[in-house]
Image: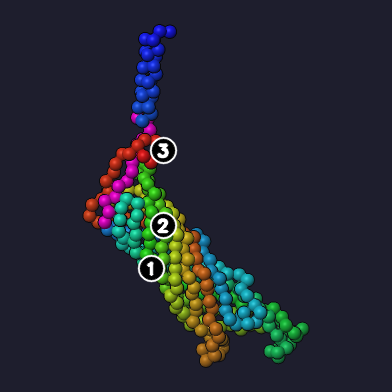
Amino acid sequence: MGTFGKKLLSGLAVTLCMTGAANAADILPPVVEHRASGGWYLRGDIGYDFYKTGNFSQAGVTAASGSFISESIDRNGHIGVGAGYEFNDWLRADATFEVRGTEGFAAVDRYLFDCTAAGLSSGSCSGGGIITRNNMWRGSLTTQALFINAYVDIGTWYGFTPFVGGGIGLAFHRVHGLHEFDPSDLGGGSYALTGKKTSFAWNVQAGFGYDVTDNLTLETAYRYVSLGDATSGRLCPLPAGCGSTLPPLEISNVAAHEVRLGLRWRLGGGHTYTDVGYGPGRG
C-alpha cells in the first residue's frame, strides 16, 4: 500500500475514535460536582432505633453473687433540630438537640439467697440452705441529647452526595417508674425514686444527601449513637417504703443503631453546579 493510502487509513482511524468518544459522552450523563456557596443552614431530623442496648447492674444483686441474666430496652423514635455552617464544598458542621421518646425497659436478675440466715424453712426454702432467686425489673428511660457534629461530603454523582460524619455531646437521662419484684412464693419487691444523670455521648454516621432545590437538601443516614450511662433513684423496699433504701439500678453503655431522615435548609444563597466530566467517576 502506498504512502497516501496509509495516511488516509490513519486519518480515518483517528476520526472514528474521536467520533466514538463523542458519542459515548453523549450517551453517558454528566457527573456534576456540587459546589457549595457556604454559609449557615438550619436542619431537622427524625430517626428510629432499630436496635438498642444497655448493661444493667445493681449493688444489692452483685453483693449476693448475682447478675442480670436478661436485659432489653424498647425501640423508639426521636426528633431533632439544629443549625450549622458549610465551610466549603466538602466540610460542614452543626449543633443539634434531640428529644428521644420514652422507652420502656425490662430485666431479670439471678442471685443467691441464704434461707437459713433469713430464718425461712417453708416453700422455696423448705430444704434450707442457699437457693437461687430472681427479681423482675420494669421501668422507663427518657433521654435528650445535645451534639456538635462534623461531616465530610465526599463528592456528588448524579445529584447524590455521600457523606460520613460524627459528633460528641451530652445525653440527659431520666429513669422513672421503676419497680422490681420476686415472682416466687417468697415474694418481696421495691420501687425506685426518679433518677437523673448527665453523661458523655458520641455518634458516627454515614449517608447521602440529595439537593431537592438550590436551598433544600434531603438526607438519609445510618447512625450509631452511644448515650453513656443512666441511673435510677434510690430503691425503696416494700412494705417499708423509703424509710429504708437500697442502691439504685444502673444502666451503663446505653447505645443504639438508628436510621435517620433529615432536611437541611440553606439560609441566603444556595448551591451552584459545574459539569466536570462524564461517566461513573468524578472529574
Q: Nearer the viewer, mark 3 or mark 1?
A: 3
Horizontal arrangement in the rendering, residue 101 relative to residue 35 (left or right) = right
Percent coordinates x, y for residue 132 in the rendering: 69, 78
Numbered mark located on residue 134 in the image: none
Chain-order first, disc 1 or disc 2: 1
Percent coordinates x, y for residue 48 in the rendering: 45, 60
Where does the N terminus fall, quadrant-wise? top left
Decide: is 249 above or below 36. below
Disc 3 designates what residue? Answer: 280
Percent coordinates x, y for residue 157 in the rendering: 38, 43
Numbered mark located on residue 165 in the image: 2
Discs 1, 2 touching: Cβ within 8 Å: no
Discs 3, 1 touching: Cβ within 8 Å: no
- The residue segment tinted magenta is 26-39
In the displayed orientation, state which residue is furthest to the top. Answer: 2
Q: What crowding class fits label 2: few (fewer than 14 Cα within 10 Å), some (14-19), or many (20 or more)?
A: some
| Residue type beneath disc 1 | Leu
Decide: is 281 above or below 105. above
Q: What's the residue at 39%, 14% (across, down)?
A: 9
